Image (spheres, grey):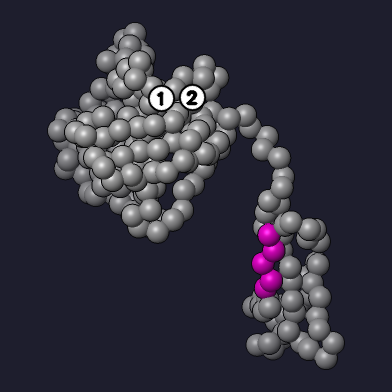
Amino acid sequence: FPQKDQLVIAMNTILDPQTATHPRQAATLQGETRAQGSDTPSLSIVMEDRKSPRANPAKASAEKLNFWYGTNQALKNINLVIPEHQVTALIGPSGCGKSTFLRCFNRMHDLQADTRYAGSIMLHPESVNLVGKDVDPIEVRMRIGMVFQKPNPFPKSIYENVAYGPRIHGLAKNKAQIDEIVEKSLQRAGLWNEAKDRLAQPGTGLSGGQQQRLCIARAIAVSPEVILMDEPCSALDPI
């Protein structure tokens, strides 16, 4: 049963159509309690222990991060630790700075004029400051991939969209190895079965959801240390 400092959701109505004998009755479940004189079950489910320790060490950490578009300060003193080997989600209203924060990690703001960083984003275990002036943004983007909200495949074939990164980064010694990377990346993105017979066709000829999966395959093909995803599911087809 839930303890102190645990997030609890109370479910006031539990209905199992296989065992229910009345629209307001259901079989007793483990951990279930019923109010005296009531047929309505009440069940408390522990969803998360907010004080449970993080098992994974930090992969990146923002420390007193500030960012400006010209004179407009978009980020103010952000401090956040990103553990490795797990998903960290940023949730907030439109315009609160989620995308701005993400794009700091791979220096996408450097492509815009009159932008400025202060503070640091440390990439571990080397403790490299990703927004440091002495750090090459190209090297940063080799280690940190990104998938955008809208699909943006290269004007190349499906095969070349995925093979391009491993080839220019020297991740494969021959075509057989590139072929293997392309196949595994498309499989992991859930696109292989739909694209394996049309790899030579343009990536831009795919549907919107397929293009987004192609972009995901392209991102994971180079085995980045971190993948930034800016609302990537908004362009995916429902399963």
Q: Position of residue 100 (x, y in %)?
A: 34, 43
Q: Residue furthest right?
A: 36
Residue occupying image coordinates x 58% and y 30%: 58
Q: Is residue 58 left or right of residue 200?
A: right
Q: Is residue 144 left or right of residue 162?
A: right
Question: Which of the 4 quarters of the picture holds residue 140?
Answer: top left
Quadrant location of the N terminus in the rendered image: bottom right
Q: Residue furthest bottom?
A: 37
* Residue labelled with disc 1: 130
Identify residue type, mark 1: Leu
Main SS type for the magenta part?
A: strand
- Callout 2 crowding tier (Cα within 10 Å): few <14, some 14–19, many ≥20: many
Q: Is tag 1's residue or tag 2's residue first in the polypeptide sequence?
A: 2
- Callout 1 crowding tier (Cα within 10 Å): few <14, some 14–19, many ≥20: many
Residue occupying image coordinates x 78% and y 89%: 38
Quadrant location of the C terminus in the rendered image: bottom left
Q: Reply above or below: 51 against 195.
A: below
Q: Is residue 8 magenta?
A: yes
The segment highlighted magenta reads: 7-11
Secondary structure at numbered mark 1: loop
* Residue labelled with disc 2: 123
Tally of marks: 2
Residue occupying image coordinates x 80% and y 58%: 3
- Compare residues 155 and 98 and report the one nearer the observer: 98
- Compare residues 182 and 116 and report the one nearer the observer: 116
Q: Position of residue 98 (x, y in %)?
A: 39, 47
